[in-house]
Image: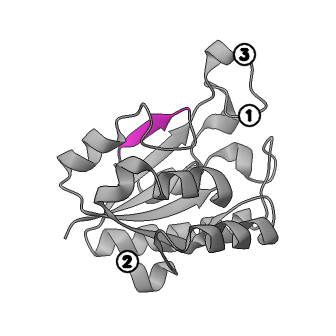
Amino acid sequence: MNKALLLIDLQNDYFPGGAFPLWHAEETLSNVEAAIEQATAKGVKIIHIQHLADPKLGLSPFFNEGTPGAEIHARVRTAAPDAPIVVKSFADSFHETTLEATLRGLDVRELLVAGMMTQNCVTHTAISKAAEKYDVTILVDCCTTVSEMLHLIALHAVSTRVKLAPAGSAI
């Protein structure tokens, strides 16, 4: 069964010095790097997902195209330099993107979900209508949000719909 590691919104604005730094961002980044290394060693496909604000809606507080904050974190790009990038402008990484076509092209059947804003883009992607055809696992140690409490609430809320596991046991 082909697996894909989805790296959602690991962008500079969510890290120290960015427009909206998140709780536990540096630790999450280290965990994601380890997951990428493990995935690469096991032949798991890796896909970057980058959120860019819709310019038709005006200037956003962060993730504006062409700004340093919207760029995928350099350490993530270095760890997976050849991974395709899917650009999105909604929380659901499938909505109006090339993600479905990319997964189909890679013959993926299982999704390992990692990234930023557990309660938003991570969970919305994991429980997307389009994700129902996949075996989905959220890598709990490879995602984060604004606080530990919100992270844990979001994981508990989605636990009836998808699997939750640390990266080491899921990849």
Residue displayed at 79% across by 31% down = 61
Q: Count residues near mark 1 (Cα–Cα under 10 Å), then give few for <14, some for 14-19, many for 20+.
A: some
Q: Earlier in the sequence, mark 2 or mark 1?
A: 1
Residue linked to disc 3: 58
Q: Residue furthest front?
A: 160
Task: Work out whether 6 lies above or below 155.
Answer: above
Q: If the image is split into quadrants, where does the N terminus sit?
A: bottom left
Task: Work out whether 88 lies above or below 147.
Answer: above
Residue linked to disc 2: 171
Q: State left or right for residue 156 relative to residue 167.
A: right
Could you tell me the amino acid type at mark 1? Phe
Residue linked to disc 1: 62
Q: State left or right for residue 150 relative to residue 88.
A: right
> Residue 85, how many percent across, how many down?
41, 41
Residue 50's mark? Answer: none
Which of 39 and 99 lies nearest the eye of the viewer?
Answer: 99
Q: Which residues are magenta?
A: 84-89
> Residue 46, how many percent across, how many down?
36, 57
- Disc 3 to disc 2, C-alpha distance: 39 Å
Residue displayed at 77% across by 65% down = 150
Task: Work out whether 112 lies above or below 57.
Answer: below
Residue displayed at 52% across by 40% down = 50
Could you tell me the amino acid type at mark 3? Gly
